[in-house]
Image (tube, helix red, strand yellow):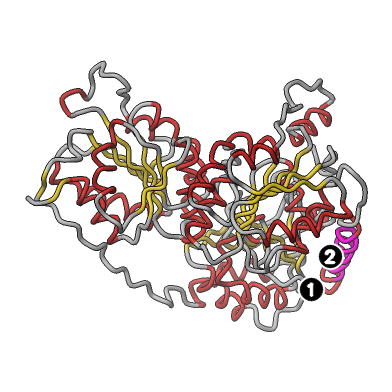
Amino acid sequence: MDKTVAEVILDQLSLLGVKRIYGVVGDAIIGLLDAMAKQDRIEFIPVKHESVAAFMASAEAKLTGKLAVCTATMGPGAANLLNGLGDAYSDKAPVLAITGQAPRNKIGTDYQQYVDQQELFKPFATYSANLASEDAIVDLLQKAAQTSLQQRAVTHLSIPKDLFQVKTDAKARALPTVIEGTASFQTEDLKEVAAVMKTAKKPIILAGAGAKKAASSVEELAETWGAGILTSLGGKGLFQESTSSLLQGIGEGGNPHAAEVFKQADVVLLVGVTWWPEGYVPNNARIIQIDTHFATAHKGIPTELGVNGKAEQVVPLLLQSLEGHQKNAAWNTQIEEAKVKWAAQNEEEGQITGSPIHPSRIVRAIERTVAEDAVLTLDTGDITVWMNRNFRQIQQSVLFSGYWRSMGFGLPAAIAAKLVQPEKQVIAIVGDGGLQMTLADLLTATRYNLDITVLVFNNGSLQMESDKIQAAGDRELGTQLTNPDFVQVAEACGWTGFRADTDSELESILEDAIRTTGPVLVDIYTAQAFFPETE
């Protein structure tokens, strides 16, 4: 019994490949922090608010697909994690939260800050347990890690504060190696799916991030089947712009000419996407969905046939099944016309001039200046829909809050991305409202001298909400912001600050900012432009 529970926790997490834990110091986790201070395998990344710690863990898990970890004290600390864990839960990111809990002899009493954490975390955590014995720590950690990684889920362990420094016989052990077959499907298994696909006269493929390893096969399938390709925000950049069947995005912020095409579809194949753009979808289409976790992926989509498997395994087999299929030439012409029309309009929108600077013009400047393999982190709000509408993604990785759609995601995600992939160019694209929700963590980037660039669409408004209020004919209240001088705030935090007031100087300022070493913020004077697809 030569190791404490806290030391065994770190041994186990290290075996799982965990390199850092995000969190805020608190009384109930002091024992864990003491153990972390005495080793150098796992780094503690202290942040200003627990929600940021959970956002950072979610962003790391989304970027790497590996287990990411955050920690907090009991009571308010644990409660503050929930927003970021909601993001991880909604976007199926494998995140483990470790929280301190009341001492064992105070659990269930009126002890200060005590709350039943298993009930607190229940909406988001697929597995949540309270450690009752020091000798159970490895079993609980293994179950949590396996659940997170196999189900791409949030898990949670609460540890009574008096247990962290108790000695235990438990020893860390690696997770079992799972050998996945490469041929779990045969063409015959997909006979019913292929039969439905062959009935299509107006087929559409809706692809998301889960189609990444099958992108080339999806393009071939679209060509053979005569289908258009639409993408979710997570699926942008998977396909070459030159792909004749590519219509780009759909829904709020997507290709506005694709909506009329999509509504005519008679068979829709969803590949690696759990998003169904209500309001833009066909009424009577037959829907087929491919996902590795179909049972939790359909999310209310009116799917007729579900295929529980990897896109890279299933799509090539469907391609074989459709060999010789007769395409609908008129449908392909309609798809191409919508593609060409939007390409011209998108190019035109990116050339809008003036000051304040139009969001489309800012997006075009971002497109022209960021590296092809950059990591872009998007906050939630008006900037999300403008980026979805106008940004012509190449090979950039884009992190965003998908289903949870929380403001405040952009800056924490950028900090995590740079810690995880220091060799990459990392750009956070945020609104003025979203940035102010996590503004204190500018200092976290300062602490680690992170070479990130934050681009602020500063229009003094919660513009997306303003647009929706205007569209509904209601009166606005609370949408206009009281903003600080973001450059002065950034500089006070040790950042380099730039300001862009006109579109004529925008590219040169962004280039200077990206070249500047260390954390950099660019305050962009942005027009309060009404988003054209607002309903």
Q: Give the range drawn in magenta.
A: 333-347
Q: Do the residues labelled 1 and 2 touch (CB within 8 Å)?
A: yes
Left or right of residue 390: residue 148: left
Is disc 1 placed on a helix, strand or loop?
loop
Residue 392: image location, x then y, percent: 76, 62
Q: Quadrant of the C terminus?
A: top right
Q: Which residue lies furthest to the top in this view?
A: 110
Q: Is residue 246 left or right of residue 88?
A: right
Residue named by callout 1: 244
Is residue 369 or residue 101 the one in the foreground? 369
> What is the CA distance from the residue labelled 1 to the residue labelled 2?
8 Å
Residue underneath mark 2: 339
Amino acid identity at mark 1: Ser
Query: Three-letter amino acid code at disc 2?
Result: Lys
User: Looking at the rendered structure, which numbered label has been put on residue 158?
Assistant: none
- Residue 59 seen from this side: yes
- Residue occupying the point 28% across, 48% down: 36
Q: Locate residue 1, reporting x and y percent.
A: 7, 50
Residue drawn at x 27%, y 37% is 30
- Quadrant of the rendered image containing residue 177: bottom left
Corner quadrant of residue 478: top right
Q: In this view, does 223 lie to the left or right of 472?
A: left
Q: Vertical placement of 383 versus 248: above or below?
A: above
Q: Decide whether the magenta segment is chiefly helix, strand or loop.
A: helix
